[in-house]
Amino acid sequence: MTESALGQSGTHGRRVMRSSLALARGLGAAHSGVTHWWVQRLTAVALVPLSLWFIVAMLHLLGTGQPEVVRWAHHPINVVLLLCLILASFQHMQLGLQVIIEDYVHNKLTQLATLLVMKAITLLLALSAIIAALKLAFSR
Amino acid sequence: MDDIREALMLGRQSDGKPVRRPLSPHLQVYRPQITSVLSIMHRFSGMALAAGTLLLVAWLVAAASSPAAFARVQGFIASPIGWLLLFGWTAALYFHLLNGIRHLAWDLGCGFEKPEYHRSGWMVVIATAVLTVLTWIIGLAIW
């Protein structure tokens, strides 16, 4: 009797139709992709409360000046939540845009180039936002 | 290196001239439904929000910089085009958020029956409109 990597015993007691080698390798036809799907859902769940908090925070800072924003950023909880929002948003955004590009750009080279440019821009934006948030947090 | 499926589209006219075989009309004739419309709106709102992150980052960076830079960004936000963009992004955020929750429910296996997804679809649309207007009423009152 063979024990599969998923802990189900026996060749006929399996819940998935896979050979032992396939189960050992653990990859489907596309070889990857579930991570993308899972991280997209993970960031989505995180973004539900974070987005609502962000809207409330923005309403709170509406019409005030820069000193107010700096004072707001001096509360650690605000910076922490802001950083969580930035990380979750840009990760979620990047994964979503990836799917869109893969859907509409078919030329392999153009697709790869577009994906890389998109990810690079996203990374730059995310880092800019993080640095700015930290700058605000640690400013006098 | 383009799409290999183009090879399936090779045809010839009766005079021998090679042509791309025609496709049946789909988007031109299929009636828009709550399912398809909300699906593409989810993608559009996502793209709009992605564009919106540019303003978000600009605002954050300006807030962390000189008062002059911050005043410039605030000035843009307070301009007519700024208000239009902000309104659009509020609606896009609420829609994407609510329809996203609808998607997450599907991921859990719930809400796939026709009456269910019709109901949830319309709830998303109505809630988006209500929340957007509510947020703006509150915002204008504060401002």
Image (cartoon, coloured by chain):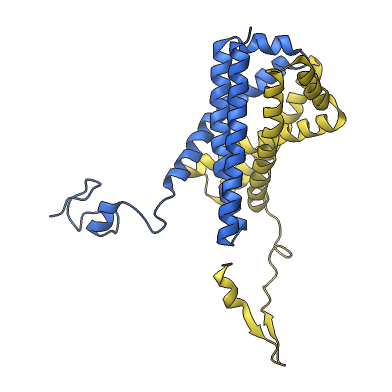
The quarter holding residue B48 reads: top right
Horizontal arrangement in the rendering, residue B126 relative to residue B101 (left or right): right
Where residue B104 appears, as percent x and y from the top left, is 51, 40
Quadrant (top left/top right/bottom left/bottom right) for the N terminus of chain A:
bottom left
Q: Is residue B109 visible?
A: no
As drawn, B51 above or below A99: above
Residue at x 43%, y 43% (from the top left corner): A35
Query: Looking at this view, is A117 or B122 the one in front?
Result: A117
Quadrant (top left/top right/bottom left/bottom right) for the C terminus of chain A:
top right
The quarter holding residue B23 reads: bottom right
Query: Looking at this view, is A9 or A96 the one in front?
Result: A96
Q: Residue furthest top?
A: A140
Q: Is residue A23 visible?
A: yes
Where residue A108 appears, as percent x and y from the top left, is 55, 60
Query: Looking at this view, is B3 or B132 the one in front?
Result: B3
Query: Looking at this view, is A73 or A119 the one in front?
Result: A119
Q: Residue furthest right?
A: B80
Horizontal arrangement in the rendering, residue B82 relative to residue A87 (left or right): right
Q: Residue furthest left?
A: A1
- Chain that the image shows in blue: A
Residue at x 70%, y 69% (from the top left corner): B25
Where residue A49 appears, as percent x and y from the top left, is 56, 25
As drawn, A60 above or below B47: above
- Chain that the image shows in yellow: B
Figure disc tally: 0
As drawn, B33 above or below B17: above
Residue at x 57%, y 67% (from the top left corner): B3
Q: Residue furthest bottom?
A: B15
Where residue B14 appears, as percent x and y from the top left, is 70, 92
